[in-house]
Image: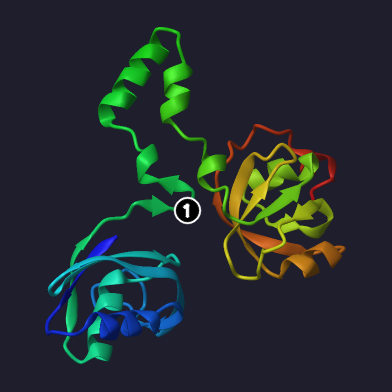
Amino acid sequence: MGVLYLHGDVSDEELEDAIGKFRGPIYQRPPVKAAVARELRVRRVCEFEILEREGRFVLVRTVVEAGTYIRRLFYDIGEVLGVGASMRELRRIRSGPLHERDSVTLQDIERAVASWADGDEGPLRRVIVPVEEVLSHVPRIVVKDSAVSAIAHGDAVKAPGVVAVSEGLRKGKDALAVTLKGEIIAVVRPTMDAEHILEAKRGVVAEPERVIMERDLYPPMWKKGKSL
């Protein structure tokens, strides 16, 4: 949610029409002070609605693809309207499956840790979300137990070790390598789309980006010449 400030007067109809132009895929160039290269790129605005308006101040709600710059989005709306616009406030209420209503305070965590130290781990389990739940929206590559240790040591995901693949997985887009139990092994970058991974008989299907699992949780099968 954010507050869009209009630098000039426009009607509700003009504003709604301008916002409608920014639903769906849009072009954006990151601002000068950004952590990424200033290259033109496409980002998707899934939802964009006006919640309330008071003069030139407009409260809006957006659901956007990761990497979308809301400040730039508001600026571009002002350009389309011909009066200029800027962002006055911004509040993130959801990120992936995590919602603001599920937030906990530092005091909650402090009390949970104290309970854990006294032998009661229930409160700690309620305030700390497993990484598998946090990344539940990310496409997955399920691998055999015999391939887990190699991937946990930084090896690539190879075709013979793959059991299943999420339907929406795409080449070059971050995915997760997971065990048969659903445990996350690593964040990986697929080298091919889902359908091609399932058809592959050999070779690398995903390169490692970041290992999550402890290295020695599963036995190292490659020592027996069975690295997958």
Query: Picture coordinates of residue 34 (x, y %)?
Result: 29, 71
Residue 215 in which image quadrant: top right
Secondary structure found at label 1: loop
71 horizontally vs 95: left or right:
left
194 horizontally vs 119: left or right:
right
Say which amino acid is labelled 1.
Gly
Colouring: rainbow
Q: Residue sitting at 70 percent across and 46 percent down?
A: 150
Residue 200 in which image quadrant: bottom right
Query: Picture coordinates of residue 38 (x, y %)?
Result: 34, 81
Asked if residue 47 is positioned above or below residue 164 in the image, the reply reads: below
Residue in front for this viewpoint, 178 or 221:
178
Res. 200 visible in picture: no
Q: Residue sitting at 23 percent across and 73 percent down?
A: 33
Total number of numbered labels?
A: 1
Within-10-Å neighbours for mark 1: few <14, some 14–19, many 20+: few
Residue assigned mark 1: 96
39 horizontally vs 162: left or right:
left
Asked if residue 155 is positioned above or below residue 130 in the image, the reply reads: below
Q: Quadrant of the N terminus?
A: bottom left
Residue occupying the far top of the picture:
118
Query: Picture coordinates of residue 55 (x, y %)?
Result: 12, 73
Residue 61 in which image quadrant: bottom left
Q: Residue sitting at 79 percent across and 41 percent down?
A: 146
178 horizontally vs 137: left or right:
right
Query: Picture coordinates of residue 3 (x, y %)?
Result: 21, 65
Residue in front for this viewpoint, 186 or 164:
164
Res. 161 visible in picture: yes
